[in-house]
Amino acid sequence: MSVTEIDVVSFGYLHGAPPEAHLTLDLRRHFRDPHVDPALRHQSAHDVPVRRAVLATPGIRELIAAAALLADAYDAGPTEAPLTIAVGCAGGRHRAATVAMTLATRLSKTGTRVRLTHRDLAKPVVER
């Protein structure tokens, strides 16, 4: 095994530059933003309705599966090193946090140590 541990970091582009990462998933333009739904706007990935809405978005589950395959590819490499995967959306409270949580859970099932960090999840909703 070459990947000693995987850091999965969710973040919001509206709160600053993306964290340094080997892989960065940018969810802003291709996947529906729950922020546009007033019922979900002030909730976060800690809330079941947000997670359901994000995971029901066409393409999201396929993206999570593809990111897990990319992690496997790094793991197959000859050099042992940690891997960082960053997942970003506009505010970091809905899409990025849900995808990061789901990806971290999936990756942890392989026996690799996975650390999940939500850089911006606790920050206030960005009004736009």
Image (tube, rainbow, N blue to C red):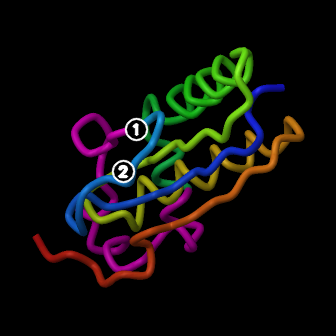
Q: Crowding near pointer 1: few (<14 within 10 Å), some, many (20+)?
A: some
Residue 91: where, in percent of width, then height?
29, 65
Which amino acid lies under the numbered mark 1 shown in the image of this protein? Leu
Give me the residue at 58% from left, 51% from top: 8
Q: In the displayed structure, would residue 90 be above or below residue 127? A: above
Q: Secondary structure at mark 2?
A: strand
Q: Please name the residue shown 33% across and 40% down the image.
A: 26
Q: Is residue 94 magenta?
A: no
- Is residue 75 toward the left or the right of residue 28 in the image? right
For residue 77, what is the image quadrant? top right
Say which residue label 1 marks. Answer: 25
The amino acid type of the residue labelled 2 equals Gly
With respect to residue 125, does 10 lie above or below? above
Q: Quadrant of the C terminus?
A: bottom left
Q: Main secondary structure of the magenta part?
A: loop
Compared with 87, 70 (above or below) is above
Q: Find the distance from the CA under tag 2 to the CA under tag 1.
A: 6 Å
- In the visual, does 47 lie left or right of 112? left
Residue matched to label 2: 88
Q: Residue at x 67, y 45 (%)?
A: 6
Q: Nearer the viewer, residue 89 or 113?
A: 113
Q: Which residues are magenta?
A: 24-51
